[in-house]
């Protein structure tokens, strides 16, 4: 698969709150397109100390305590500074997709992943002086809407996952499902 050819990117976030200004533990992004399938991905685990002042929710933290040991690895993973992580994501989108102006940027829910990540990006831009988010908001797409378009898509959703609530694994699984769904729609 050649860099720069994939017109879609699937985002999955792991957070410490459901609010738009949540602390973000990690982001997973996978490039894909219906014609070529699923491409490479990137996972970034963000420094939490730099995010002091962003929202943390006790219910979400309690939820994390109940997750598998594999999912909770995000709490002990090597973290990168926020600006470094966002730089890596920007490079990934430039290298593996059709680019910031045209890539279809998917999240699981019209009001979650993309909204939280845009809020995070704008906050980081002000705090650290990084550039604008590397996707055009008019190209936000909702995986939750896609998977509810047809009753038959439920069967696709039965695909096994490696680790539930790992940003990269969830983004890859969602991208694999989206490829199959989009192929059926065409």
Image (cartoon, helix red, strand yellow):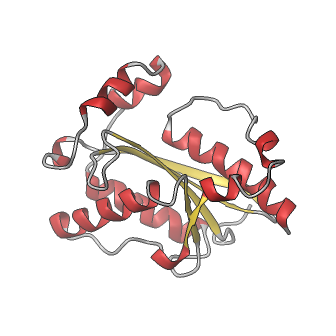
State the residue in front, 49 or 55.
55
Task: Report the side of 31 relative to 131 (left or right).
Answer: right
Q: Is residue 18 visible?
A: yes
Task: Report the side of 3 relative to 71 (left or right).
Answer: right
Q: Is residue 67 above or below residue 5?
A: above
Quadrant location of residue 125? Answer: bottom left
Give the residue displayed 51% in from the left and 62% down from the top. Answer: 92
State the residue in front, 33 or 66.
66
- Residue 52 is situated, as x and y percent measured from the top left of the image, at 14, 45
Give the residue displayed 50% in from the left and 34% down from the top. Answer: 165
Give the residue displayed 83% in from the left and 65% down from the top. Answer: 185
The N terminus - image quarter: bottom right
Q: Is residue 136 visible?
A: no
- Residue 90 is situated, as x and y percent measured from the top left of the image, at 43, 66
State the residue in front, 124 or 107.
107
Task: Report the side of 159 relative to 9 (left or right).
Answer: right
């Amino acid at each position: 698969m050649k860099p720069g050819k994939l017109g879609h990117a699937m985002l999955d976030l792991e957070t410490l709150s459901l609010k738009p200004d949540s602390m973000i533990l990690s982001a997973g992004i996978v490039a894909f397109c219906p014609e070529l399938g699923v491409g490479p991905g990137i996972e970034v685990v963000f420094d939490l100390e730099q995010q002091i002042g962003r929202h943390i929710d006790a219910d979400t933290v309690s939820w994390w305590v109940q997750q598998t040991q594999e999912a909770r690895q995000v709490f002990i993973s090597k973290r990168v500074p926020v600006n470094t992580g966002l730089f890596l994501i920007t490079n990934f989108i430039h290298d593996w997709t059709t680019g910031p102006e045209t890539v279809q940027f998917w999240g699981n829910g019209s009001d979650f992943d993309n909204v939280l990540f845009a809020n995070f990006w704008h906050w980081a831009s002000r705090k650290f002086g990084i550039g604008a988010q590397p996707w055009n908001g008019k190209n936000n797409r909702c995986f939750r809407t896609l998977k509810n378009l047809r009753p038959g898509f439920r069967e696709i959703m039965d695909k096994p996952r490696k680790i539930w609530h790992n940003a990269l694994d969830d983004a890859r699984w969602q991208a694999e499902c989206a490829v199959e769904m989009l192929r059926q729609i065409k």
